[in-house]
Amino acid sequence: MFENLSDRLSGVFDRLTKQGALSAEDVKTALREVRVALLEADVSLPVAREFIKAVEKQATGAAVTKSVTPGQQVIKIVHDELIGVLQGEGDPGKLKIDNPPAPILMVGLQGSGKTTTTAKLAKRLKDREGKRVLMASLDVNRPAAMEQLAILGQQIGVDTLPIVKGEDPVAIARRAKTQASLGGYDVYMLDTAGRLHIDHELIAQAAAVRDVANPRETLLVVDGLTGQDAVNVAEEFDDKIGVSGVVLTRMDGDGRGGAALSMRAVTGKPIRFVGLGERMDAIEEFHAERIAGRILGMGDIVSLVEKAQQTLEAEQAERMMKRFQKGQFNMNDLKMQLEQMQKMGGMEGMMQMMPGMGKMQKQMAEAGMDDSILRRQIALINSMTKKERANPALLQASRKKRVAAGAGLEVSELNKLIKQHRQMSDMMKKIGKMGKGGALKQMMR
Ligand code: GDP
């Protein structure tokens, strides 16, 4: 149905050559695709625009990791930024329910899943935290809704406040409060009336109940499939009633979760729970990274990227280890090592990552091999012929002159490099002989 963002981006980046860093042009191209993906996921236009701006700033000039494509890299930056926006402070699943009986006010439009969510949360509090919960329906206009809560209560073993005909919502809230105190309940949950649309009466009623109950949490239940509408509803409710968090329902459906991002960006309210079905245990606390993956239309992209990186490095190390064990260490190997060192933040960074390499580090320092020299040594190797690289013993007087001149350097520098190579080659042989599972394996890890 939706084209995967990573497919889309790899198409874009196939046409670009890989460079050392993401150029402004690369980033712009990629972010056009990201923007489409966000809009398809139901993120509102102004939110998508703002988001793209933030990512653009971060991504431009970011270093390109060798084993990850620029497309994957942009996705990772987008993904991390998504999580940054989605993530609220603290534990979303932890409801404020100290000082019993703690009131929780449930608000939202009719059909959003408010009654179902009330029961789901009550069951969760009972099962996970051993709390005694009392639920009360305040939907006096819809007797069926009151019945529904009572039935759900029976199903999950949670008490509901007995229904008294003709009582108004504020009176019910008062009675629930009294009953919760007298009955020794830890929590009482007020399931307010919903309408199909927000209107004055709905808000006034919820506000009146709020003033009586003084809730510790006011949770707004919104249908995650309604996209932009959900954001308007959230803004309105928060403005008039004040909410402490949002529950997104129907996230088991086709919705792409964009509403979560818009809602968070527009209202600043944390998303606390996600409804994942009709069953009473189909609710979980909000995980920013899951929604981020969903908005981007893929699973866990970060672990994917990290895995790609690890696999590549492991493969390289394995190949090198095999060669060293056979005593093969030519100028190509040395060049690869030198380049690796450059990538890993120079000599020191490299040595710190290799246990037991103190001696080698000392030898290198004695040979005058510091970070500034890496580039020159690579230039010297580049100046050698294929045969010379594979067999450095070929490098005699006239060849040396040619190679040094080709790199614009003195023969004495080349001599140092050759000596360096010989020393490292000897050491690699020794280490290789120390056993397959031994020091070398350690070192390459
Ligand atoms: P209310 O009018 O807001 O109280 O909505 P209800 O709680 O009565 O829910 C309306 C319908 O949505 C019911 O059939 C619920 O079973 C269903 N529902 C609620 N939450 C979810 C959810 O997270 N996923 C799915 N698939 N259905 C849900």
Image: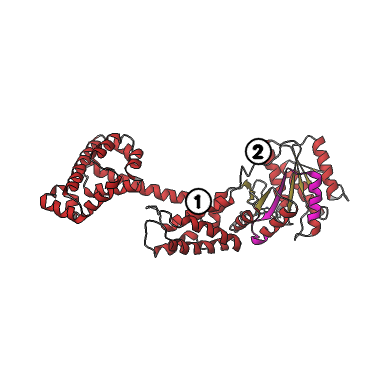
Query: Is the CB of the residue bearing disc 2 within 8 angstroms of ligand 1?
Result: no
In the picture, which quadrant includes the N terminus? Answer: bottom right
Q: Give me the residue at 72% from left, 54% from top.
A: 239
Q: Is residue 301 left or right of residue 341?
A: right
Tell me the quarter of the picture where residue 369 sits. Answer: top left
Q: Give me the residue at 48% from left, 52% from top.
A: 301
Residue type beneath disc 2? Arg
Tell me the quarter of the picture where residue 126 sits. Answer: top right
Q: Nearer the viewer, mark 2 or mark 1?
A: 1
The residue singled out by tag 2 in the image is 128
Disc 2 is placed on an element classified as: helix
Depth check: give the residue in front, 400 or 114. Answer: 400
CA neighbours of label 1 inside 10 A, class few (<14), some (14 to 19), many (20+):
some
Residue 207: tell me if it is visible. yes
Disc 1 is placed on an element classified as: loop
Residue stretch rendered in magenta on the structure: 203-230
CA neighbours of label 2 inside 10 A, class few (<14), some (14 to 19), many (20+):
few
The residue singled out by tag 1 in the image is 300
Depth check: give the residue in front, 356 or 282. Answer: 356
Q: Which mark is residue 5?
A: none
- Disc nearer the start of the sequence (2/1): 2
User: Where ligand 1 lies, by image quadrant?
Assistant: bottom right
User: Which residue lies most toward the left here?
Assistant: 397
Q: Is residue 73 left or right of residue 414?
A: right
Q: Is residue 381 left or right of residue 191?
A: left
| Residue 219 magenta-highlighted | yes
Q: Is residue 322 left or right of residue 50?
A: left
Residue type beneath disc 1? Asp
x and y percent of residue 13 in the render? 42, 62
